[in-house]
Structures are given as C-alpha cells and as structure tokens.
Image (tube, rainbow, N blue to C red):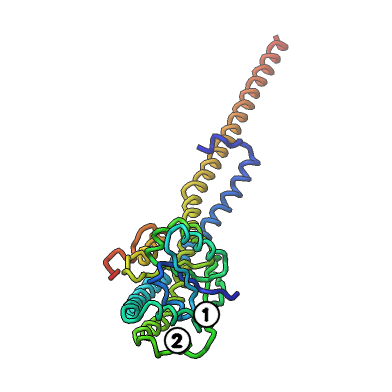
Amino acid sequence: MASTHVNPTRMELTRLKKKLVTAKRGHKLLKDKRDELMRRFLELVKENMELRKNVEKGLEEANKNFVLAKAIMREETLNTALLAPLQSISVNVKTNNVMSVEIPSFDYKTRTPDENGMYSYGFAFTSSDLDYAVKSLSDIFPQMLKLAEVEKSCQLMAAEIEKTRRRVNALEHVMIPETEESIKYITMKLDENERSTQVRLMKVKDMMIKEAIEAKRSVSQ
Amino acid sequence: MSKGIAVIGDRDSIYGFASIGFNIFPVSNTEDGIKTFKNLCKGEYAVIYVTEAFAAEIEEEIEKVSENLYPAIILIPGVYGNTGKGVLSVRKSVEKAVGSDILFSGGTQD
C-alpha cells in the first residue's frame, strides 16, 4: 500500500488531508459532469440513429436513380453533364461548447439561391432519370449535413465521456481510498508515538520518585 | 470559417454528388486513396463523406483524425449496397460512452 511510503509527520498529515478534500470535491464535480454529458449524449445519439436511417434510405434511393441514369445514357454524355457543376456549397463552421466539449455546428450556403441550380446540364441530351437522381440527392442534402454535425458531436462526446469516466473511477477507487489509508496510517503512528512518550515519561517519573525515596531513607538512617 | 464538403470513394458511388456542389474525389486504389484522404484532412473541408467500402480500407487513417474537431468523417453507403458499417460506427460510439451497447441491442436497428 501507499501508506508505507509516507512520512508519519504532522506536516504530511495536513498535506494529505488537504489532498483528500480536493480529491473528494473533484470527484463530485467530475461525476456531475459525466452524468450531464451522458444525458445529452443519449439524446443526441438517438437523433443520430434516426438521421442515419433516413440518410441511408435517401442515398439508396438516389443511388438507384443514378444507376438507372447510367444504364440509359452513354457514359460520356453523363460525364459531360456533370463535368462542370453549377452549384457549390460552402459550410460555415461554428463550435459550441457543451460541458467543456467542443462540438461543431454547420451552416451551409449555396452559391446560387435558385433551387434548380443543381442541374448543370441542358436537358436535351440527358435522360430524365438523371434529373430524378440529382433531385433526390439535393433533397437529402440538408439531412446529410445535419447527420455530419450530430454524428461528429456524438463521437467527440463519447470520447470525452470515456475520459471523464476513467477519471471518476480513478479518483473513486484509487486516489481517495489510498489517501484515506495514508491518513489513517499517519494518525495511528502519531498516536502510537504519543503513547510511547507518555509511557516513557511515567516510567522516568517512577524512577525519579523511587530514587528520591531511597535518598530520603538513607539520610534518615 | 468557410469550408467545403468532400466526398471520397469509388467513382460510381460518388459522381452524382458533384451536381449538388460537393467536391468529389474518386479513388481507384487504396494507396492513392490514402494520399488523397490525408490531403483532404488538412483543414480545407469541414465534412468528408466516405463510402463504406472505401472506409473499410482506410480504417487506420480515419481513426487517426477522429479526435480532431474537423473534419467530420461520415460514412455513407455506396452504390454497391449498404454494409451496415455506418450504423456500426454509431453503435461503437455508444459502446465507448456507456460501456455497453444498451440502446440499439434490442433489434431496433431495422
């Protein structure tokens, strides 16, 4: 145990007592942090799962349409149609702070506000399947971005929760018991010293009294 | 900060994303793919969508950048079907946080 490594002195005892108070307070705070993070995480992860299901379904649909388009059109026509995209998207990134975890929040801006801006081709040489495909993609896009935001937040929070949980456990099961053990050891040791001093003093007193009595007796004889 | 969105994966799965303004990066082999992916992670992009099939090949690289705030690496199903890897990554983060998969273990997945 750690108690064998400490100096049984009063100074050490004071130090350890202070340390114990800090550890207990830290433990309480971290525990609160973990609980709150967990609550938010569970809310977020449910949303995450829901979004993911939607997005995956939407993408599957879009992919189907793209495969159809590709089957009907010549590869070169398709490539040409999508060669020069009209639309471009810039994402504005902000960070929010949740219980000291930085989580991202995305805000997107499209270059053309026109909602038909994603059709970068004339309709003459392309099949209508391509239009459907592009439409289905652009429909699912806001959800995709939301998913990115939520899923990244979930990942970051999961990592933070794991860290916090480890700290809480380390404090609860290692740090605090060890400090308590050390304090107990020092108190015992100090008490023991006290007792031995007491006994020694009593013994010395006894001896002195005995000597005094004998000295008196020899004088009176 | 204004950043872009990138999509990386096999060509057939991602070429459509160009139409809605994503930047697409088709990969044909893993080696080039890793190089491209590393370049994308340098901060120009806020979100990188990776097809599940390609993500399986570069798992290590994804793991490396997962601690950073950006970019967010999000798995999407490719044209060859849904491998369930995306859902798995959500469950993994639950497992990491809670210690066991308590939320979705009861067949709520489908």
Q: Nearer the viewer, residue B66 or A116?
A: A116
Q: Nearer the viewer, residue A39 or A81?
A: A81
Residue A128 in the image: x percent, y percent?
Answer: 35, 87
Q: Amino acid at mark 1?
A: Ile
Residue position for label 2: A121
Per the image, label 1 sits on a secondary structure element best described as strand
Query: Does residue A83 show up?
Result: yes
| Chain identifier of the residue bearing label 2 in the image | A
Left/right placement of residue B93 relative to residue A97 reads left
Q: Amino acid at mark 2?
A: Tyr
Query: Does residue A40 show up?
Result: no
| Residue at (61% x, 49% y) in the render | A18
| Residue at (52% x, 67% y) in the render | B71
Quarter of the figure with the C terminus of chain A: top right
Residue B19 in the image: x percent, y percent?
Answer: 45, 81
Q: Which mark is residue A89?
A: 1
